Amino acid sequence: MIRFRRTATAAAALAFTATATVVLGFAGPASAHVTVNPKEATQGGYARVAFRVPNESDTASTTKLEVVLPENAPVGSVSTMPVPGWTVTTEKRKVDPPIEVHGSPLTEAVSKITWTATGDAGIKPGQFQEFPVSMGPLPKVDSMIFKTLQTYSDGNISRWIDEPVPGGAEPEKPAPVLTLAAAAAPSASASASAAPSAAAGATNDDEGNGLAVGLGVAGLVAGLAGLVLGGLAFARTRREPVAKS
């Protein structure tokens, strides 16, 4: 009986180890691709995002990153933050129709951003690096797909260019995706709630004014009544005969 329990326990442990190996074995590579963070922004606004680049190689360093901006979603303003040890260049393309930024039409937009490591600044094995970018106004589309090339010091290139398939599994080399949500419209309920509040305020003011007027009238009546009573008392005193001693 004891031997049976030990055998069952060993079998369960072996099954758990095998399952964990399979799960982690698939999860590891899938989580090591280039991503954009945060993953969501708002249409029409500006966003500060960072392209997060992990190094997948065990022997080589990442020395170049090329990010291609989507042609169907041009952005009028794109600026980069300095990354120590890396140089950055941008390429532009013509856009038609022009993009309107702060009331001014722009006929060109950034099409590609390239970061290149200098000296020994490459991303070493087991490390990652972020490359911040500010961009906007963001286009009115559901998402922006940034096809990316990651070059290693040994000449190998990881091509993160696969577009997501709605309802499908994650591609082998997925491109970074920034999801864009529609800007929130002014809430009608807020306006509706403001109107009753104003009406309630007006009602309260009217009630307060009416109460003040009523109290004033009551005070006036009371004063007049006091004068009348005082007059009557004075008249009675005048009519009463004075007792003689």
Image (spheres, rainbow, N blue to C red):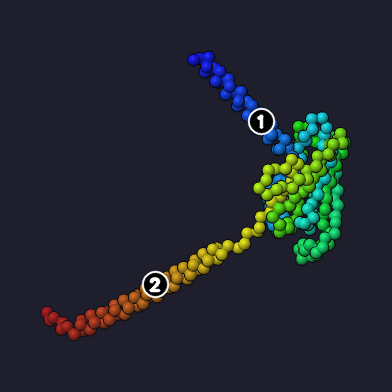
Task: Estimate the x, y position of residue 40 in percent, counting from the top left.
Answer: 68, 50
Q: Which residue is mark 2?
A: 211
Vertical arrangement, residue 78 with respect to residue 55, above or below: below
Q: Residue at x 77, y 66 (%)?
A: 103
Question: What type is the residue that disc 1 sits on?
Answer: Val
Q: Secondary structure at mark 1?
A: helix
Q: Nearer the viewer, residue 56 or 164?
A: 164
Distance from disc 1 to disc 2, alpha carbons, whole Å, reads: 80 Å
Q: Residue at x 60, y 25 (%)?
A: 15
Q: In the rendering, which numbered label is found on residue 22?
A: 1
- 133 with respect to 1 (left or right): right
Q: Nearer the viewer, residue 243 or 108?
A: 108
- Residue 119: which quarter of the image? top right
Question: Label 2 crowding class (10 Å Cα cut-off): few <14, some 14-19, many 20+?
Answer: few
Q: Secondary structure at mark 2?
A: helix
**Residue 65 can be seen in this image:** yes
Task: Estimate the x, y position of residue 229 in percent, counting from the top left.
Answer: 25, 79
Question: What type is the residue that disc 2 sits on?
Answer: Leu
Q: Nearer the viewer, mark 1 or mark 2?
A: 1
Question: Label 1 crowding class (10 Å Cα cut-off): few <14, some 14-19, many 20+?
Answer: few
Q: Residue at x 71, y 47 (%)?
A: 164
- Residue 57: which quarter of the image? top right
Q: Residue at x 82, y 48 (%)?
A: 113
